Image (cartoon, rainbow, N blue to C red):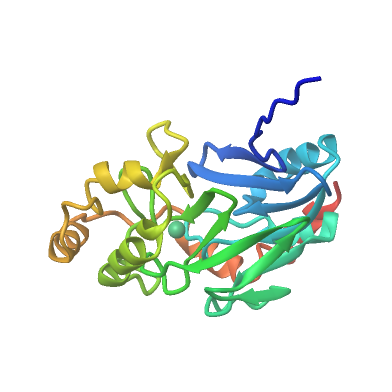
Amino acid sequence: SRVIAVSFPDTTMQIRQLFDPESSTFSYLVWDNSTREAALIDPVQSQVHRDIQLIRELRLILKYTLETHVHADHVTGSGVLRKTLNSIVVVHEDSQTKCADVQIKGGDFIPLGTKRINVINTPGHTNSDISYLVHGAVFTGDSLLIRGCGRTDFQSGNASLLYQSVRQQLFTLPGDTLVYPGHDYQGRCCSTIAEEMAHNPRLGLDKSLDDFVDIMSNLKLAPPKHIHEALPSNLRCGISGKDSAMAVL
Ligand code: FE2
């Protein structure tokens, strides 16, 4: 009999991208197929019913909710998900979030089934941004968007720091690493590190630090619509007296 050596891609890690049209936010359900353990990155509170239904349909065990940063444009679903599914709320140690179960920092890793999620510090959009690297994919929050990046004009944002984070942390990953951003406003869903190095109009390899700082200081953006509700609420995992009634699902 003849033996043919065939190598198959590792299909253990699975990713589902989810979208909230109101805030153009992406959430990501990531799981290890061999153990069914899952993490939900940047859950949106107004979408938790949808997310819980998906988690139940796929027979997953939601171990963690992972925040890429303290969001100014939507309220996190982490507190409601913890109440409903017993998930562990994970945030950056510098985020000043009062309600988290686990605080992490760059260089840490989070075990997920037989795999691990690597934590990369990518500050600059805020003072405590995290990117999560999982098996050939990086979830960049607002540090790196497709052909763009998050703003740097509030929440202790710092354009020089963001440039450094993207160039020294994200752009040193393998070029074929998939980039899954925190938002997209033009219908795109995914990119790669090589694609952003070549084509990102703010952070591409043809842009200097001075170019970037100049671009970021001339954006003249209006403040996000929901910043005054979202920021304080997210420091409490989205749970207040009023919201906690929602947790009956
Ligand atoms: Fe943000």
Q: Position of residue 206 (x, y in %)?
A: 16, 51
Q: Nearer the viewer, residue 42 or 175?
A: 175
Answer with the quarter of the image where residue 222 lies: bottom left
The quadrant of the rendered image in which ligand 1 is seen is bottom left
> Which quarter shows the N terminus?
top right
Q: Position of residue 128 (x, y in %)?
A: 47, 72
**Exactly how many numbered labels are in the figure?**
0
Q: Position of residue 163 (x, y in %)?
A: 28, 64
Q: Position of residue 211 (x, y in %)?
A: 13, 59
Residue 240 shows in the view: no
Residue 106 shows in the view: yes
**Residue found at the far top of this picture:** 1
Q: Give the residue displayed 34% in from the left and 53% down from the top.
A: 149
Q: Give the residue displayed 71% in from the left and 66% down from the top.
A: 89
Q: Give the residue displayed 47% in from the left and 60% down from the top.
A: 72
Left or right of 6, for residue 136:
left
**Residue found at the far front of this picture:** 1
Left or right of 46, for residue 209:
left
Q: Nearer the viewer, residue 119 or 11?
A: 11
Q: Give the residue displayed 42% in from the left and 31% down from the top.
A: 187
Left or right of 150, for residue 32:
right
Left or right of 166, for residue 20:
right
